[in-house]
Structure formats: structure tokens, C-alpha cells
Amino acid sequence: MDISPARISVPTEAKKGDIIAIKTLFRHPMETGYRVDRYGKPIPRRIVKRFSVTYAGDVVFAMDFTQGVAANPFIAFHAVAVETGEIVFVWEDDQGKIVTERRTLTVAR
């Protein structure tokens, strides 16, 4: 199973200095490597190992995952609207697959 496109909630517009809520939910099995299939064979580990978000070129949020994170992780955080720019979301799993999503935030002065 590949990383699916994420559901992302981010405002399209904000005033300079506003605190904005950013939420994302992405589909991924987050397989721990500890389970076995119905034949008793180990199911290989497959997790998203890194998630990062940049806004106007600066990292505003990043986290490393472990096998203790449930499938289909939901992440929410806040950022300050400082300038009009692109918000870039990047997920990387331990098999080297990378998914990137982009949103634009327009900041009024």
C-alpha cells in the first residue's frame, strides 16, 4: 500500500500575525513489523518515518515517527501567518517513498 494523498485543512487566507490551524490526515498502514500474516510469516515493517512542513521556505513543523504510531495518522499544529507563501507537506516512509502536497496561504497586510 502506498502513501495516499492526504486530507489537509489549512486556511487559504489570513491576516498578518494570525495564528492558523493546520491539520492533516494521511492513509498509511504504519505496519510495525511485529505482526504475522495468516500463515505465520512476519509482515515487514512499513512506517512513515518523517513528516515535515515548510511555510515560505522555513520549517514550521517536523516529526519523526516510530512503529508506535497508529495507521492513518492525524496531525494538527498551529503556525503564525507572516507572509503569502506556499505550505509544503512532505511524508517519507521507510521504503523511500515520498509524498509531497502543497497549499498556498495568502496573507493580507
Image (cartoon, helix red, strand yellow):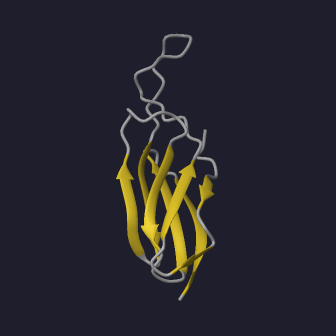
* Residue found 51% across the figure and 61% down from its top: 21
Q: Nearer the viewer, residue 68 or 2?
A: 68
* Residue found 43% across the figure and 32% down from its top: 45
Q: How many marks?
A: 0
* Residue 2 in picture, x, y percent from top left: 60, 44
Vertical position of residue 10 compared to residue 73: above or below: below
Image-based side of 14 in relation to 44, left or right: right
Vertical position of residue 53 compared to residue 7: above or below: below
* Residue 41 in picture, x, y percent from top left: 48, 16
Q: Residue furthest top?
A: 39
Q: Would you identify the image quadrant in which residue 68 lies?
A: top left
* Residue 79 in picture, x, y percent from top left: 44, 67
Q: Nearer the viewer, residue 101 or 1?
A: 101
Q: Nearer the viewer, residue 44 or 72?
A: 72
* Residue found 54% across the figure and 83% down from its top: 84
* Residue 90 in picture, x, y percent from top left: 49, 60
Vertical position of residue 89 compared to residue 46: above or below: below
* Residue found 60% across the figure and 67% down from its top: 11
Image quadrant holding the N terminus, namely top right
Q: Would you identify the image quadrant in which residue 67 lies?
A: top left
Q: Residue furthest bottom?
A: 109
